Image (cartoon, helix red, strand yellow):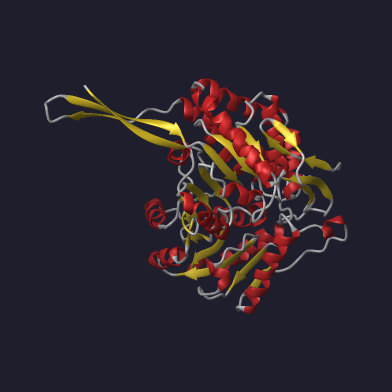
Amino acid sequence: MSVKSLRNFIGGRFEDGIRTFDKLNPANGELVARVHEASRDQVNAAVAAARQALPAWAALPVNQRTDYLYALADGIERRFDDFLAAEIGDTGKPVGWASQIDIPRGAANFRAFAEIARTLDMESFMTDTPDGRQALNYAYRKPLGVVGVISPWNLPLLLFTWKVAPALAFGNTVVAKPSEVTPSTATLLAEVAAEVGLPAGVFNVVHGFGPNSAGEFITTHPDIDGITFTGESATGSTIMKAVAPGVKPVSFELGGKNAALVFEDADFDAAVAGVARSVFANCGQVCLCTERVYVQRPIYDRFVAALKLEAEKLVLGRPMDSATTMGPLVSHEHREKVLSYLRLAVEEGATVVTGGGVPTFGDERDQGAYIQPTIWTGLPETARCIKEEVFGPVCHIAPFDTEEEAIRLANDTHYGLAAAVWTTNLTRGHRVAQAMQVGLAWVNCWFLRDLRTPFGGSGLSGIGREGGRHSLHFYTEPTNVCVKL
């Protein structure tokens, strides 16, 4: 694989940074790219370019503005193989996952928000006045302004476009920083933006890290009007402190310690398959993944045995091999974090049902960041491994007796992102799902998404909602206009 040079995209032009850093392939440790870190002056230039482009971009008729979004979606699909290779090189995820989820969703996000922007209606009210006449009140929505976008490494293109698309659709300009761990597809998107003629300054990409680098330069910049961020809860807290002096709006989708509840009347095979997917998909590196599994006692032992078999059937292989069902973690640094939790679980008294370590292949994969899919039982609910997000292919399974106990266990967390309920009793499914203190609750499914629905969490899982019309609340500012008739 040739080593690429990933440059910053500022005001419609690609620029070298003040220095470069290496991007390694997590599947084999090979160098795949040298990434140009942006200086503070370059971030300032990107913000200035976005500010200069804002009035004309916001003033474009909606159909013309969203035509660019359709063109970006077409451009992603036209260069599908390039995006696929870049995503796999950055993350090591299997080709089946990346080709069916990451790249198609990257394009779909642009189309979905283009359609939403074109069909928005306007809230209005007729108001009776004291003199017997009436007044017309209507809400006029204006773009928030220059939006800082900071996106994570686990679903790089999908979550990057999930933020960039609504920002652009609703008339904002963007200064975006992808994760330093997965910078390639954001750079490719900048190439597509140039190819389709997106006006200079509307979309800018700067590379770098957090503290004393591009991330901090964006979040502390006085001309950034709002920050949207997906990532770790601790980083979200740091960003909140950075924007607090300017009282700037934030949209955060943060971590999760998500629960799955499996009732004894569940379709057993479907529940096992669904929970296996929700635990191990993308090597457990999805904010929506399940890390706590609660199973009603009559089927508990059978379920533990069945999930163990599913974990041990996973094929830890090369990303481009179609038979591979689980790739490596995103980096050796992240693997060390996950391994620290595997060691901690044993110290806290866990029974390791399967996994718990690093696989050995005898080939180049031993230089990668692979880890065994792992299942624990026997931990107390007070254990750190029950309370803290691991973000790897790991879960703990515990029994419950009653519906009330299951709800209490699931909600006993400072996070509030997602939950899944497995039962053939539809009334119970509705009841328990509504009792979950989360932003998303699935019944007899997982990761099934409609892009028009609200997405986000509460507590340590974030602030605000994204998706469909719900994105309006962050990316636009309403002004009420009152006209006396």
367 on left or right of 58: right
* Vertical position of residue 203 compared to residue 384: above or below: above
**Residue 64 % position (x, y):** 54, 20
**Residue 16 % position (x, y):** 77, 40
Residue in the foreground of this view, choosing between 225 and 277 = 225
Quadrant position of the C terminus in the picture:
top left
- Identify the residue shown where x is 74% and y is 34%: 14
Would residue 321 be visible to someone looking at this image? no
Residue in the foreground of this view, choosing between 221 and 317 = 221
47 on left or right of 15: left
* Vertical position of residue 145 compared to residue 387: above or below: above
* Vertical position of residue 336 compared to residue 43: above or below: below
**Residue 334 % position (x, y):** 70, 60
- Identify the residue shown where x is 48% and y is 29%: 117
Residue in the foreground of this view, choosing between 240 and 429 = 240
**Residue 375 % position (x, y):** 63, 66
Residue in the foreground of this view, choosing between 424 and 83 = 83
Quadrant position of the N terminus in the picture:
top right
- Identify the residue shown where x is 53% and y is 36%: 167
Q: Residue lying at the far left in this picture: please name it.
A: 131
Question: Residue 9 appears in which quarter of the rendering?
Answer: top right
Would residue 87 be visible to someone looking at this image? yes
Count of all numbered marks drawn on residues in the image: 0
